[in-house]
Amino acid sequence: MKQINSDQLIADFVIQNKEQYYRLAFYYVKNKEDALDIVQESIIKALSKKESLDRPELLKTWFYRIVVNTSIDLLRKQKRLVIVDDEVLTSLDDGKLDQYTDFDLKNTLDSLPVQYRSVIMLRYFADFKLEEIAKILDENVNTVKTRLYKALSMLRIEMNVI
């Protein structure tokens, strides 16, 4: 790809799909600011590694892979425990009842190991085909299939759905 065209191609693509990439990053980190940072860092990585994109038609899976890897990298860096005392928690309580939809599913998904959660999220929330997921995660299609079925089995067990 020509440098000028590749920069513009990547920029146009990211602008058109920015909400999808933000949602993907947010799903991993559960934090607005971190998700925005991930998208920004992913754009920088994409522009600096644009020569690794051999075929423009693979831009979607190529950039998804960058976002997923950047999200996982941030999670690894953030493995630290933040302790909040009861007084702080009480001061943040506004007395209203929280409204959660699909809370059990969300908690169960969050409890899955990241390799299983990634496959579920990319398949059912981002609507990728198994072959595309394999490219994004840089895995064999059979590995993706195995992880998908294992993750679904784990979800069924955790949610007592048989």
Image (cartoon, rainbow, N blue to C red):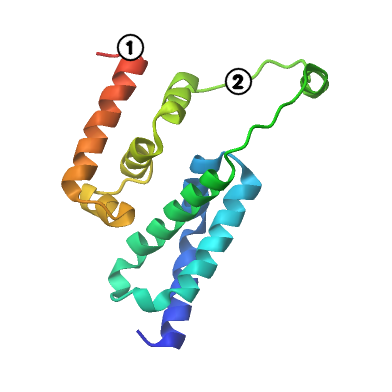
Amino acid carrying label 2: it is Gln
Quadrant in the rendering for residue 159: top left
- Left or right, 33 with reference to 115: right
Position of the C terminus, as image quadrant, is: top left
State which mark lies toward you, 2 or 1.
Answer: 1
Q: Looking at the image, is mark 2 or mark 1 earlier in the sequence?
A: 2
Q: Quadrant of the N terminus?
A: bottom left
Give the residue number, with chain letter if any, for mark 2.
99
In the drawing, what numbered circle is on residue 147?
A: none
Which residue is label 1 attached to?
160
Q: How many marks?
A: 2
Neighbour tally class for label 2: few under 14, some 14-19, many 20 plus, Cα within 10 Å: few
At 29% across and 70% down in the image, what residue appears?
57
Q: Is residue 57 left or right of residue 40?
A: left
Q: Position of residue 28 (x, y in %)?
A: 49, 42
Q: Is residue 2 visible?
A: yes
Amino acid type of the residue tagged 1 in the rendering: Asn
Q: Answer with left or right where residue 88 lies relative to residue 103.
A: right
The x and y percentages for residue 17 are 46, 59
- Considering only vertical position in the picture, is 66 above or below 51? above
Q: Quadrant of residue 138?
A: bottom left
Element class at badge 2:
loop
Image location (x, y in percent) of residue 161: 29, 14
Residue 153: which quarter of the image? top left
Q: Nearer the viewer, residue 15 or 80?
A: 80
Q: Badge 1: how crowded within 10 Å, few (<14), some, or many (20+)? A: few
Q: Cα distance, mark 2 to mark 1?
A: 23 Å
**What residue is drawn where x is 20% and y is 40%?**
145
Residue drawn 56% across the image and 22% down it: 100
Q: Tell which of 69 and 14 is nearer to you.
A: 69
Q: Residue at x 50, y 21 (%)?
A: 103
Where residue 56 sits: x, y (%)?
Answer: 32, 74
